[in-house]
Amino acid sequence: MIRYRNVTFAHPNRPPLLRDLTLELEPALTHALIGPSGCGKTTLLYLAAGLYAPLSGEVSVAGKAVSPGRRETAVILQDHGLFPWKTVRANLELGLRLRGAKREERRALAEKALADTAMAGHDRKFPKQLSGGERQRLAIARALVLAPDLLLLDEPFSALDAMTRERLQNRLAELAASRNAGASSGADAGNGLTVLLVTHDLAEAAFLADRIHVMGRSPAGDVRIRSLDNPLLAEVPPAERRASPRFLEACARIRTVLEETFVGEAP
């Protein structure tokens, strides 16, 4: 789904953050990028969104070079990106309206997205009337209503309290599993949802991600990535995952790989 080939990237007047990086993220899976601050996690997400352009190399999504505004890509950032002067429903339908969807279609799709994210009954409220968790659920609903095949998430739950964060993680896990039921990494993968999640939270990565990409730096300062599969997701449903011994095993394995990959002060 996402392919970084020999990518070099640098912010203006700064040394390269990424140098000749190659990484491939398979479709219809949830991928987590985890590592210390400043190692390039958000940069990789912005490159996949087309918000950044590499100095050299190529970033492609679904076999095509990335360009800003790809219709099938949805991005959710920490600040939610909601319009405060619009109601929940107006925020939710904006993307559909811009795509020319008819009123009946917009209403039907909005109702389903509200139900899927447990936001039914909030449609006439404004963002300032919502809790932090409700605003984040609205951001997720607004992304999913457009039926993306790629969902990019940059620390989406970091500012929430623990219980709200767990509830939203549960909802995201359920939605991804529902979209990917019957999809595979083969010919049918286009029917599924690929998720790229940037997080600092080991437990969040273990709970949500099929594949975890641990980022660090070599002694020379180059970014290095170690990828590992997470068998927990295939073996334990979301409702039972946190209480499973396999969950603690997955967290411990990620921590070990992170400590081995990280150079410098322990994270």
Image (tube, rainbow, N blue to C red):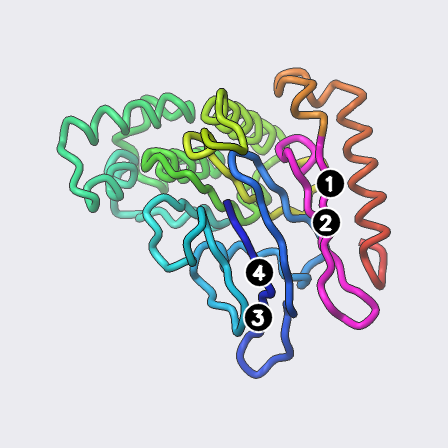
Disc 3 versus disc 2: distance between alpha carbons? 19 Å
CB atoms at circles 1 and 4 under 8 Å apart?
no
Q: Earlier in the sequence, mark 2 or mark 1?
A: 2
**Element marked by disc 4:** strand
CB atoms at circles 3 and 2 under 8 Å apart?
no
From the image, tell me which residue sits under label 2: 214
Disc 2 versus disc 1: distance between alpha carbons? 8 Å
From the image, tell me which residue sits under label 1: 228
Q: Earlier in the sequence, mark 3 or mark 2?
A: 3
State the extent of the magenta-drawn residues as a range: 205-230
Quadrant of residue 167 in the image? Answer: top right
Q: Please give the count of numbered marks on the rendered protein.
A: 4
**Kind of residue sitting beneath label 1:** Leu
**Kind of residue sitting beneath label 3:** Phe
Of badges 3 and 4, nearer the viewer stands 4
Picture residue at 60% right of the left edge, 29% below the top: 166
Q: Nearer the viewer, residue 149 or 166?
A: 149
- Say whether residue 260 is left or right of residue 140: right
Classify 10 Å Cα crowding around label 3: few (below 14), some (14-19), many (20 and above).
Answer: many
